Image (cartoon, helix red, strand yellow):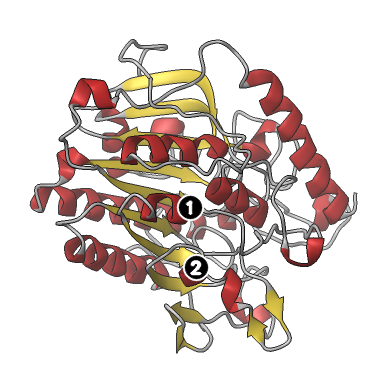
Amino acid sequence: MNPTFRTLFANLYFRNCAARCLTILAIALFVNYSAAEEGAGDKQPNIILIFTDDQGYEDLGCFGSKRIKTPNLDQMAAEGMKLTNFYAQPVCGVSRAALMTGCYPIRVAEPGNVKQLHTVPHPQEITMAEVLKSAGYSTGIIGKWHLVNKTGKGYDPATMPNAQGFDYFYGTPVFNGYTVYVDDVPLRVPIYRNEEIVVKGVESWDNITADYTKEAITYIERNKDTPFFLYLAHNMPHIPVGASEDFKGKSEYGPYGDTIEEIDWSTGRILDKLKELEIDGNTLVVFTSDNGPWVETTRGMKPAGRKFIPRDHSGSAAPLKGWKMSAWDGGCKVPFIARWPGKIAEDRVSSELLSTLDLLPTFAKIAGAKLADDRTIDGYDATGFRKQRDQPPG
């Protein structure tokens, strides 16, 4: 199937599925929080959203992986909750557009009134960062944006993060590549700090996770005394994968496993920093992925096709069928963990349905932010979740 039609079909599939499932009486809500319960004088909570790239449903220990070691994320799940039916969209830019706007990607307006393969929200769309900024939050994105419109001169500034509600940006405007190794093609992706290019073209992705982690910790330290929203959008484990010296060659799963184990380390460093700064109890941390794993052992998975991505360079959606860019669950069901001491019950597992669309209205509610009256938001506010357990842990 042509990739454009395949992606459109997947979007429409998810839209129809969500329309049926999200209208149930009891929506999948994950935060035990309300202004009435907590008191109007409470400090606004910090929000950290950790978003990985092309990570499969199974690729955490707490979601079933036997070969990838993720002790920090497993501990995060034990101290919070795990959703086993959390849905994104099956391809990168589409998923990030849904996340940032709370809307079905097919609804999101784009520059020039076109629908691109990777959705680019129109500058007049209202993003999650703009919503939280309106409530007094400092807003930062570290990592991959991938919601930018390309022009003949580079990237349209009106569609870059600093113009879309983020006070601070450090990362890549687009994906890190589309081949197994950087040297397979001439493409070199820049790294920006706000509107300035600080790396003209990345030659190796080995240090990107450590680099982002350092930036994230600095951002947290700088904003610890004010409510902040940090969107940490890892480039990993999208190909070309990379891991720093402490992790390269260490995972039983191979190069892909190395990247996940370093992301696990990164998450642990961030959680430790929250405790050190004594803001742990006032910070909601969410961990999830933009879509399922990119599994194409041959181009288009054709039996006689040219070899493409080795299995140890991509993840697993087991026990689900499908992978990134497919309409099966393996393409859009992703791991999800949420932790907020004292607000989210520990060691909880829920099979209720939630999606990336729901995060914007949920974050807005806990931040005390008002959603625009002139916009249709397809996501649901999920701040009413209670402490009862839906499934046994594990």
Q: Secondary structure at mark 1?
A: strand
- Residue 110 found in image quarter: bottom right
Q: Closest to the observer: 25 or 197?
A: 25
Residue at 71% in and 81% down: 151
Relative image position of residue 62 (x, y in whole percent)? 39, 32
Q: In this rendering, does residue 246 appear at all?
A: no
Q: Decide: is 293 above or below 248.
A: above
Relative image position of residue 74 (x, y in whole percent)? 32, 36
Q: CA distance from mark 2 to mark 1?
A: 18 Å
Residue at 46% in and 80% down: 192
- Graded by Cα atoms within 10 Å as few (under 14), some (14 to 19) or many (20 or more), the crowding at tag 1 reads many
Residue at 77% in and 58% down: 117
269 lies left or right of 258: left
Which numbered dot is residue 161?
2
Relative image position of residue 217 (x, y in whole percent)? 23, 63
Amino acid of disc 1: Thr
Relative image position of residue 2 (x, y in whole percent)? 89, 54
Amino acid of disc 2: Pro
30 lies left or right of 16: left
Q: Closest to the observer: 278 or 134?
A: 134
Which residue has dot 1 on it? Answer: 52
- Graded by Cα atoms within 10 Å as few (under 14), some (14 to 19) or many (20 or more), the crowding at tag 2 reads many
Q: In this rendering, does residue 381 appear at all?
A: yes
